[in-house]
Image (tube, rainbow, N blue to C red):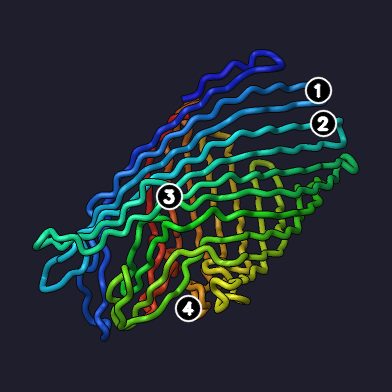
Amino acid sequence: MTLADVSGPAGWRLQGWARESDLANTSISVAANRATTAPANDQYATPALGYGLNAAWQSRGPVWSWEVGGDLRIASGRAFEHFRYQGGRYTRRRESGGRTAIEGIYLDITRDTGPLLVTGGLRLDAWRQSGAVRLERDLSTGLVILDNPSKGASGITPTARLGARWVVSPKTWLRTAAYAGFRPPTLNELHRPFRVGNDVTEANPALVPETLYGMEFGVGGDQGVDWSLTVFYNEVRDPVTNVTLGVGPKTFPVAGFIPAGGALRQRQNVGLIQATGFEAELRKDVGTLDLQFSAAYTMARLDGGRSAPQLTGKRPAQAPRLSLSAGLGWQTDSNLSLSLNARYDGDRFEDDLNTRVLPAALSVDGRAEWRLDDRRAVFLAAENLTNADIVVGQTGDGVNSYASPRSLRLGFSVR
């Protein structure tokens, strides 16, 4: 819901939102010979509620524009599940969850003098983690097997950004930016363990927010083709990473028994990630055709610090060095529009120790849309058009997880 009054040079805005969700999920364990599977976990309910509010006062002029405001985001959730499948039935029940809240105030200022545009912003955020629950019971007796609540955490994090764009000539521009930001851990990262095959990943209610510091420089223009090239350096401190604690067969505190071929991981804040790279974009309109291409190359390196020295020098999990994308759009003279998009991601590691390699993948998507009028349209969308086997995960004993195969959707949209 949004309420606003921006009829003059100054105005206000009030926005509110709420979202409620629930889902069920099951996982399996894999036999040592990989010939059979058995139930391992049944998350039969995961109720969650999130809501927020933003209020702002702004002014826009020919040279100076500014906005001052505040926002609030609150999320709470629980996961209820059965686990420890023995003798043809689940023997344990688990409840886990908690609550997070972020309150912030901010100021954004922009100065536009024609060829030079300068923009900056300041934020101050207070964050809280509370209400943590980790309770496990024996299903046959009802006795509590594990009661592992954790104390809450809170803090205040300042962040800022500063950027400038200079039009050198009618067809060329330069830009630069420096920025800082932060991301609090999610409810899942704090409280919800999960299992894939024989690999178990434990949550961690002691996580703190990760912070980002970065700078970049870009050049671009329009000499018949819209183009841009950007180089950047980013540093993420206290990144939330799935850290391998050990492999099975072995019994661990809290997590319990990890079978042969499986691994136990836990979400942890580890040292920092340093990433340097470049991004390039090209776009060209040829009559009714719209051609787009982009590329990104990133050299990222972990420094595990004292908490995880075994990760120093490793590449972050699920982070390819090279990513490419290309798109082709065709707007006919009638109400029909067609598009085709392709994305290539280079090989990447599935795990923190860089022992499991996920191969490079190419995915192709397409869409055809027929507009009935200015607001309504029918469409046919195809995802993974070539039905490629795109590996997105791999367990310790070599079991791959794949992205969705070719799928078609027929729909109706209203704008």
Task: Say whether marks 3 and 1 touch (CB < 8 Å).
Answer: no
Query: Which disc number belongs to residue 356?
Result: 4
Above or below 315: residue 129: above
Graded by Cα atoms within 10 Å as few (under 14), some (14 to 19) or many (20 or more), the crowding at tag 4 reads: some
C-alpha separation, residue under disc 4 versus residue under disc 1: 55 Å
State the residue position of label 1. Answer: 62
Which residue type does callout 3 highlight? Gly
Circle nearer the N terminus (2, 4): 2
Q: As rendered, which of 140 and 357 lies closer to the eye?
A: 140
Q: Residues within 10 Å of mark 2 (few under 14, many from 20)?
A: some
Few, some or many residues within 10 Å of mark 1 (<14, 14–19, 20+): few
**Residue positioned 48% across, 64% down in the render:** 268
Q: Name the residue under label 2.
A: 112
Residue tagged 3:
152
Query: Which of the two discs, 4 and 3, sits closer to the camera?
Result: 3
Using the rendered view, name the quadrant where residue 302 is placed: bottom right
Q: Specify whether 412 is left or right of 322.
A: left
Residue 164 appears at what percent x and percent y?
81, 42
Query: Secondary structure under badge 2?
Result: strand
Q: Distance between the residues labelled 4 and 3?
A: 35 Å
Between discs 3 and 1, the one toward the N terminus:
1
Which residue occupies the extreme top position in the image? 8
Q: Distance between the residues labelled 2 and 1?
A: 7 Å
Residue 211 in the image: x percent, y percent?
61, 54
